[in-house]
Image: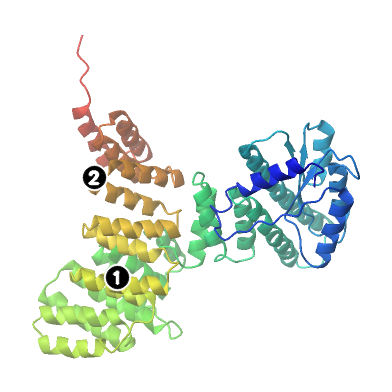
Amino acid sequence: MSEKAYEISQLRTTIENLPYKNHDKDVTISFTEVNLSDIAIEKIETNAKKNVFYDLLILSEKMKRGFSGMKTASVIHSKKWLKPPPMIMLVTDKIEKDMITNGAKIGQVFQALPYTQHDFQHSISTLADNMVKTLETNRDNAIKLFTEKGSTIDVTEFISRLNTTIIRELGPIKELAPWNKKPYLALSKALMEEGDYKTPIPILRAAILISFAGQELHLLLKKCYQKTGMHKEEVSELKKLLEANPGSAKLNAQFGESLLRNRDYKNAVGFFKKAIANHKPEDPDRLKAKAHWGVGNSMLGISDNDETRKIASEEFNQAIKVDPTLVLAYFNLISVYKKLGMEEQAREVMKKAIKITPQSAKDWMDLFFFYMEDGEVAKAKVTLTKAIIIDPENPLLPFLAGEVYLRNRMFKEAVEYFTKAVELYPSDIRFYNSLGICYRHLKEPERSIENYQKALEIDPNDHNVHYNLGKAYHSVKNLSKARQSYEQALKLNSDFIEAKKGILDLEKDEPKVPKK
């Protein structure tokens, strides 16, 4: 709202040049221009009755006719039919102290004249910050008042109603300032409080693209992935869960798989056997079948000879008996039979196997692991593609694929899949660390350093990453930073032998100080 045509024209141009398309290429911006407060109030009321609302009102403070911008804002804010009230920006050539005081009561922000594109974008961000803060403060005050008064209403139901309101009102705020991470953060928290951990994942990923630094966004995203089952638990995390529930077949099997991935075959066998022993009738057959498969695979890891092959073949046969759709067990059994010279049995198993089409991403991934282990890279890539098509939002699939490629020293392929994992889950320190390792082997130290630094922004207390960063700095002869990284690794783990060796190697390259 302004009486000055050039002022409206400048505002339109400024808004059109804001980086909305960078965040949503399909976004459209529509304007309504008026030159009188009465017309503005009437249009807002007429459209509100049609459930059409304005995201932002920009009002010129100095008006020769009708109300001033501040008065117009107060009138609009007082209307009971307008809930929630729109966000308001007041444009003025001079910001007075009383304007700020009065404007704060209705969540306004002020834009002084003249202004640059950057000034205006900053004002939009400030307005979004103010609106988020107001919503969260109102919510906290309502909960406090509810607690003090006491009520027979279910407090969780009361908080849920407040969160529903916040979620609804945060949407337009996020769209108004999509370059500001605070609305994303507040919206994600409200959704998670309501037990929705899936919806916040893309919201948090977008927020991290806006601002990678700081741990809060990364911790929230990690929690969402844990709650939705798309997080690869660390061995230490699984161990804690298992200590609390040692009779869980599922946890024993998961712990066995973690040990198997880490090539701790002897201990893996024990946990897979515990999973089999603790399997209950109500537990899935696939769980028991995978445990038998795990015993067989671990035995081959301990020692690949005829004796262990026979034990493994028994376990793979048992896995197929428990769950005839476990494709991986068939292929492992075929491989074992071939090594034992049992070609006829291998052919019979193959006839059964080719009749089964994997139904889940996990089954296709199991086939990928098998083909990679067998050296059939082309077939492995096909099965990996099918797994990702079935479950495209799961960061574990590309990460696990990246690990396999990395172990096989196929660094370019590993980079491709670790990068996909990062796109899906930009808060996992291991993804960046793995990228750093790959780039170091590919002789791209700058990119290696960049990824190690990102890992440390998420968790600055990982001694292994500090050590890896030291090696990367050492490779480009940045000896002072290499020393800092090695010393930080030792500060976090005083028994870290590799870091001590890194410093000794560094001293060989450091210039000798002449003795006096």
Residue 262, image quadrant: bottom left
What's the distance in space between the residues labelled 1 and 2, CA to CA? 41 Å
Q: In terms of secondary structure, where does tag 2 sit?
A: loop
Q: Residues within 10 Å of mark 2 (few under 14, many from 20)?
A: few
Asked if the residue at tag 2 contacts the one at tag 1, i.e. Cβ–Cβ closer than 8 Å, the answer is: no
Question: In the shown orientation, is residue 328 left or right of residue 74?
Answer: left
Q: Nearer the viewer, residue 376 or 300?
A: 376
- Residue, disc 1: 270
- Residue at position x 77%, y 51% in the image: 33
* Residue 151 showing in the rendered view: no
Q: In terms of secondary structure, where does tag 1 sit?
A: helix
In the image, residue 241 above or below residue 220:
below
Question: In the shown orientation, is residue 242 left or right of residue 79?
Answer: left
Spot occupied by residue 244 in the image (x, y as percentages of width and height): 47, 65
Q: Nearer the viewer, residue 90 or 151?
A: 90
Q: Nearer the viewer, residue 171 or 201?
A: 171
- Residue, disc 2: 443
Disc ID at residue 22? none
Spot occupied by residue 386 in the image (x, y as percentages of width and height): 35, 74
- Residue at position x 56%, y 54% in the image: 21
The amino acid type found where label 1 is placed reads Gly
Pointer 1 or 2: first along the chain:
1
Q: Nearer the viewer, residue 439 or 196?
A: 439
- Residue at position x 26%, y 61% in the image: 405
The amino acid type found where label 2 is placed reads Lys
In the image, residue 429 above or below residue 348:
above
Q: Nearer the viewer, mark 1 or mark 2?
A: 2
| Quadrant into which the C terminus falls | top left
Q: Residues within 10 Å of mark 1 (few under 14, many from 20)?
A: some
